[in-house]
Image (spheres, rainbow, N blue to C red):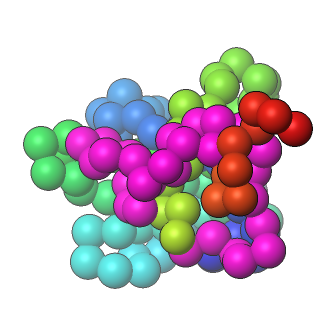
Amino acid sequence: MHTGAAAATLAVFKAGHVKFSGDDRKIYESAPDVGRAFCASCGTSLTWETVLGDEGRLCAVHISTFDDPDVLVPTAHSFYPERIAWFDIADDLPRHAGFVAGIEPLQHGPINGTLSGR
Ligand SMILES: [Zn+2]
């Protein structure tokens, strides 16, 4: 996880629908067609960007950079098997092996059971 955090929350947009203002961001190409953008002034992680089949170029924006991070609510978890082993999130959202688009989830809810019955 390039943020150094146990989890990161990103909102995914078609790249053409995202406009940046201010200084140019820096982009680190971590793999072919995968860019990780950050603020050139303070190092804050900004986006994770890739090309995904029919979806085209996508821009996943860290919600920590939003003026109002509560404006969007998570709908799924991506790259679930890659999480830190001791960490899970207490919700019943679908967990995907990779990126969400076009992939069936591995499961819904935490690995050790769902929230119901707690
Ligand atoms: Zn900055």
Left or right: where does residue 28 sit relative to residue 5? left
Residue farthest top in this picture: 71
- Residue stretch in magenta: 82-109
Residue 28 vs 95, above or below: the answer is: below
Residue at the image position 39 percent from the left and 77 percent from the top: 29
From this viewpoint, which residue is outermost toward the right? 118
Residue 99 can be seen in this image: yes
Residue at 34% in and 80% down: 31
- Please state, as top left, top right, bottom left or bottom right, where the C terminus lies in the image: top right
Q: Residue 104, how many percent across, how many down?
A: 31, 46
Horizontal side, residue 68 vs residue 59: left or right: right
Q: Position of residue 12 (x, y in %)?
A: 46, 39
Whether 34 is drawn above or below 9: the answer is: below
Does the stretch in magenta take in 93? Answer: yes
Q: Considering depth in this image, is 79 or 66 the residue closer to the camera?
A: 79
Percent x, y of residue 56: 19, 45
